[in-house]
Amino acid sequence: MVGHFGFNTEYQNTISILGPKLCVSFDRVFTIPADYENRLRARGADEESEIAVAPSDCFADFFSLVFRDLRAGRISPWHERLLRDAGSLEMLKSSARQEDGP
């Protein structure tokens, strides 16, 4: 994982997913405007391709899914995701608290 943070630098909002013989990357992963057509770039086996992703309001879509599932009584999947996220956050915090050295 690579992070870039700064108040006087060019804004970055990119993710790259790496796997065996495959790399997928795209920009505007966290703050995608509702009218923005994103592009996924994939590279594998020495070939490159690009996939257009239609514009969508990601936040509205997310909350629509959550409320739909809550109305239908499907709470467990969201509860499990929250617990996994909390566990990941705790691992990161714990790792940051550890001191380097023997």
Image (tube, rainbow, N blue to C red):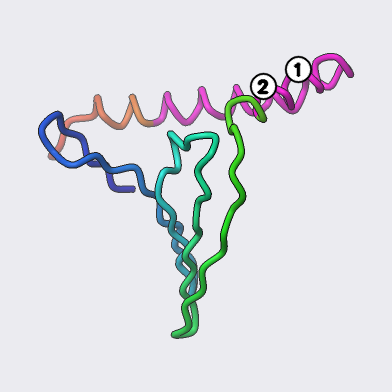
Q: Which residues are magenta?
A: 62-91
Figure check: 28 above or below 83: below
Choose top left, top right, bottom left or bottom right for residue 57: top right
> Does residue 59 appear to the left or right of 95 in the view shown?
right
Residue 42: mark: none
Q: Residues within 10 Å of mark 1 (few under 14, many from 20)?
A: few
Which SS type dominates the magenta stretch?
A: helix
Q: Are marks 1 and 2 in contact (CB under 8 Å)?
A: yes
Q: In the current view of this chain or complex, which residue is farthest to the bottom?
A: 46
Observer-nearest of 96 and 74: 74
In the depicted view, which residue is nearer to us: 39 or 36?
Answer: 36
Q: Residue at x 24, y 39 (%)?
A: 11
Q: Which mark is residue 67?
A: 1
- Mark 1 to mark 2 CA distance (whole Å): 6 Å
Q: Taking 91 as reference, is 68 above or below it? A: above
The type of residue carrying mark 1 is Phe
Q: Is 19 rendered above or below residue 10?
A: below
- Measured as percent of width and height from the top left, residue 68 is found at 81, 21
Residue 2 vs 74, above or below: the answer is below
Q: Secondary structure at mark 1?
A: helix
Q: Position of residue 14 (x, y in %)?
A: 36, 48
In the rendered structure, does residue 66 fall within the stretch colored magenta? yes
Q: Amino acid at mark 2?
A: Phe
Is 55 included in the stretch rendered in magenta?
Answer: no
Q: Residue sitting at 43 percent across and 59 percent down?
A: 25
Crowding at mark 2 (Cα within 10 Å: few <14, some 14-19, many 20+):
few
* Secondary structure state at the residue bearing disc 2: helix
Q: Which residue is mark 2?
A: 63
